[in-house]
Amino acid sequence: MDSIISVIGTYVSWDLKSLLLFAAVFIITADYIKNRRPAGYPPGPRGLPIMGNLFTIDQNRAHESMTQVPERMVVLNGFDILKEALVTQGDSLADRPDLPLQTDIAHGLGVFTSSGNLWKQQRRFVLSTLRQFGFGKKSYKGTCLLHSKPFDPHLILNNAVSNIICSLVFGHRFEYGEEKFIKMMQLFDKALQIEGSIWGQLYNAFPVLMRRLPGPHQSVKQMWNEVKDFIWVELNEHKNTWDPSETRDYIDCYLSEIQMNKGQDDNTFDEENLVICVLDLFVAGSETTSTTLRWAFLYMAKYPEIQEKVQAEIDREIGESRQPSMEDRANLPYTDAVIHEIQRIGNIAPLGVPHVTNRDVELGGYTVPKVIAQTNFQ
Ligand code: HEM
């Protein structure tokens, strides 16, 4: 009897081993076939099976954003090739990759991470509406940063920039001490921090597994839901006081656009999309602008002789009796150049935001094939 059991045991354990071996070989072969380098594709570092370059790229460097997508990536470097890709062939590279965490939050809506016809319509609308409200033209009331002692400008700048976006989209600012505003700022800060951490990267690399595992990545979705609720409250208040003949802000304009596009075949304007577009304006506009301003502070402190020249030009052209406005820009060439130089050297988005090809593209003598869309909506 013992010998029969031992024979069965040997048989079963051998069978299990071969099953595991077969599964491993099958998965690695399937992964190899799926991720084979296409003909004419640009050269690049070899990645591990399944993991790609997730753990082979230095996480402490800016390249980390490249590892958020377990797919093959092409990095373009230099003015000519970027102009070719983003301008000349811009239509073929206009789409965004399908990042599972982003998809679970935004469901393919909005303007920052959307693609195709939806992106085209939303982008056109956001650009024309922000221009209509003088974005990049007039001045927005900011915050006063007069301090007699050293202070950390981080949160003050974040609040000031976000409040300017509040006046654009909600038509009003918040008091800095207001509980609602503080809560929203904290949610943005924490959610973006987790999204940019290894948790966000693991979620995007292994969505099926990570959607089921507990961890900080789960609370990110809850945090964005709270921000969305905050925007819904503003939206409902706007609907109650909405007068199409007098548009006060981005939300009012969007409500008119929803009305105008009702019944059209390819219409992408609705309230869900409005909420995600507003969320995108905060995400795309706040951290970028406040981080650039922090670099500006640092460089002005490091190069006081340049700070003096900027100050002298502002004093000469604007004086102390009024706020600066965008109309002053033409008369402030030195200040304008310093701002551009801060943006260049601060280089806060060194890899930009990833794009994907929506058709086969020839770039710099290489062929980058169309990325087959894989929808991760749940
Ligand atoms: C210094 C400040 C800023 C920097 C460095 C910056 C940087 C960027 C970059 C690199 C992109 C990706 C472009 C691409 O698709 O290739 C982008 C897109 C975008 N930014 Fe900014 N941005 C800044 C300020 C703002 C502000 C203030 C807003 C609005 C309130 C804004 C709204 C957007 C939007 C909506 C997109 C998505 C555009 C699209 O996908 O078509 N950004 N930004």
Image (cartoon, rainbow, N blue to C red):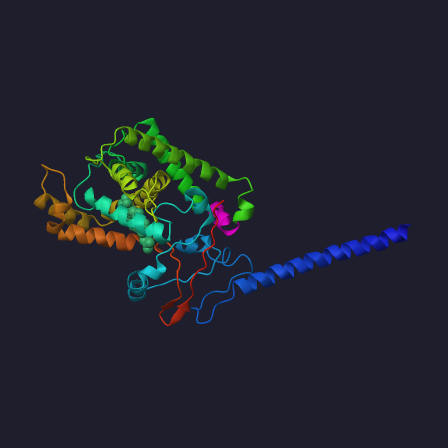
Give the image location of residue 10, x and y in percent: 81, 55
Residue at left offset 47%, top offset 54%: 374
> Quarter of the image holding residue 251?
top left
- Give the camera-side residue of 53 and 300: 53
Give the image location of residue 178, x and y in percent: 31, 27
Count of marks, rendered view: 0
- Location of residue 91 with respect to 180 vertically, above or below: below
> Quarter of the image holding residue 366?
bottom left
Is residue 185 left or right of 249 when viewed as pictured? Answer: right
- Location of residue 360 with respect to 174 vertically, above or below: below
Q: Main secondary structure of the magenta part?
A: helix
- Location of residue 57 with respect to 313 vertically, above or below: below
Magenta region? 197-206
Q: Is residue 219 visible?
A: yes
Give the image location of residue 280, x and y in percent: 34, 43
Residue at left offset 89%, top offset 50%: 2
Give the image location of residue 331, x and y in percent: 10, 50
> Quarter of the image holding residue 317?
top left
* Magenta-drawn stretch contains 202: yes
Residue at left offset 20%, top offset 48%: 304
* Magenta-drawn stretch contains 200: yes
- Give the camera-side residue of 314 and 278: 278
Q: Is residue 152 visible?
A: no
